[in-house]
Amino acid sequence: MNLKILKKSFISAALIASFFGCQSCQKDDDVSDQITPPTTPETVDVDFYLTKADQSVLFKKQDAGVSAYKENSNFTINVSSSNTYQEIDGFGYSLTGGSALHINNLSSANKSNLLNDLFKWDGENIGVSYLRISIGASDLDAAPFSYNDLPAGETDVAMTKFSIAKDKENLIPVLKAILAINPNIKIMGSPWSPPTWMKTNQNSKGGSLKPEYYDAYALYFVKYVEAMAAEGITIDAVTVQNEPLHPGNNPSLLMEAADQAVFVKNHLGPAFETAGIATKIIIYDHNADRTDYPISILNDPDAKKYIDGSAFHLYGGSIDKLSLVHNAHPDKNLYFTEQWVGINETFDNNLKWHARELIIGATRNWCKTVLEWNLAADSNLEPHTDGGCTECLGALTIDGNTVKKNVAYYIIAHASKFVRPGSKRIESNYASDLPNVAFKTPDGKIVVIVLNNTDTKKTFNINASDEPVTTSLDAGALGTFIW
């Protein structure tokens, strides 16, 4: 039900102008110094979706809880749609091989219901708009594999034995079902490891890519994009290597920044160009503590010309460091591509941390995507490789035909349902007690996502689209407000 809000007097343009300060990343305002806005005589509809930390409300539209602004001394979130930042590509998950296995094993009816709930955008469902998949196996497959596995001692630089047959078992059927629901969903591919015969240690875990196979590996990427296209699946972007500074996973690869720069500028970029492939090339795909890695590659003009942007995780560093990369190369994009939810963390702690650092923090620091890791596992957190993640809680737990929604489902839903592709982040003031982010959608709606980052209930105002309201959130609660 829409909340009909009647406001009492006109807002002074000069006063409103004083609310808005320039902001490109996170900035903490002093709550005690806030000037609250007067009211205006217009009627508006505001939708309010809520998730509470105690799980008593899980992403539910509220019929109450937002009222017309009346003069008070509470903190005001001031939103200005005249100042815009990055365009949003989407919010979603990693569709791992294990996720695809569990989804594909659902009954036909249950699979259809689940995929519609996740990917259909019709006002009822959450409308996930971006997916990341692995090129070959990730650590959340049952075992490592590539698309060109050979007996020891053999090589295939011409890729004559290249095959995505393994993906045809589960991943490709699920992707085709998703595309039938949302043909516009964007898909990113990321490799965990090249074929072992290309590596210094001949092993799926660790090692480096041998320079003599740089051309062969570039061709491997070309074959992959073309093979997926032949299945009707467009790969919008690839990252060069998942977590290139973490060779301890299985599969994994160590790829230093200097080596990635050489691979992109002399091999992968030219190979895509020669093959007429428009798939974006995205570098790094690792933690926020090593912003020097992508910046050093982008500082090389011969590499930079082939690169769309940089991707990040947050297992190290702080989210505000991503703005350093944007500021160094503002003509290149940023993507947030992975963060796992730990099985040993509580719902309330995960909700607060992921909402604050990713949905709010990553987008306030220029990211075009926010993707959680991963979409689905079973109650035993399987499958995973020998050496892969044993504590990664999926957004869904799927046991046979039983599907349980976990915290990452709700975290992404608060953004994906409303902040559609093509939306732009707009200006809003930030406070550590009430972290928030605002967007303007392609159809002109204003979306404000707010977290109560404290242990007590908070009452506050939102002045969005010249339409101030008063609302509140319980301790640790997450709200999305739509004008």
Image (cartoon, rainbow, N blue to C red):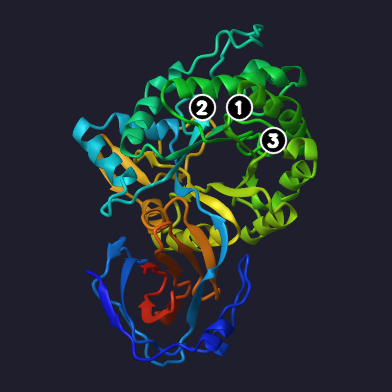
Viewer-nearest residue: 259 or 304: 304
**Quarter-wise, where is residue 159 in the image?**
top right
- In the picture provided, is 251 more to the left or to the right than 177? right
Nearer mark to the viewer, of 2 and 3: 3
Considering only vertical position in the picture, is 382 above or below 39? Answer: above
Q: CA distance from mark 2 to mark 1?
A: 8 Å
Q: Residues within 10 Å of mark 1 (few under 14, many from 20)?
A: many
Disc number placed over residue 137 in the picture, else none: 2
Q: Residue 275, image x and y in percent?
A: 62, 21
> Which callout, 2 or 3, points at the residue further toward the start of the chain?
2
Report which residue position mark 3 lands on. Answer: 306
Side of 77 relative to 377 (left or right): right
Which of the two residues, 461 or 443, is positioned nearer the viewer here? Answer: 443
Query: Marks 2 and 3, Cα distance to the nearest angstrom?
Result: 26 Å
Q: Amino acid at mark 3?
A: Tyr
Q: Residue at x 66, y 48 (%)?
A: 332
Quadrant in which residue 115 is drawn? top left
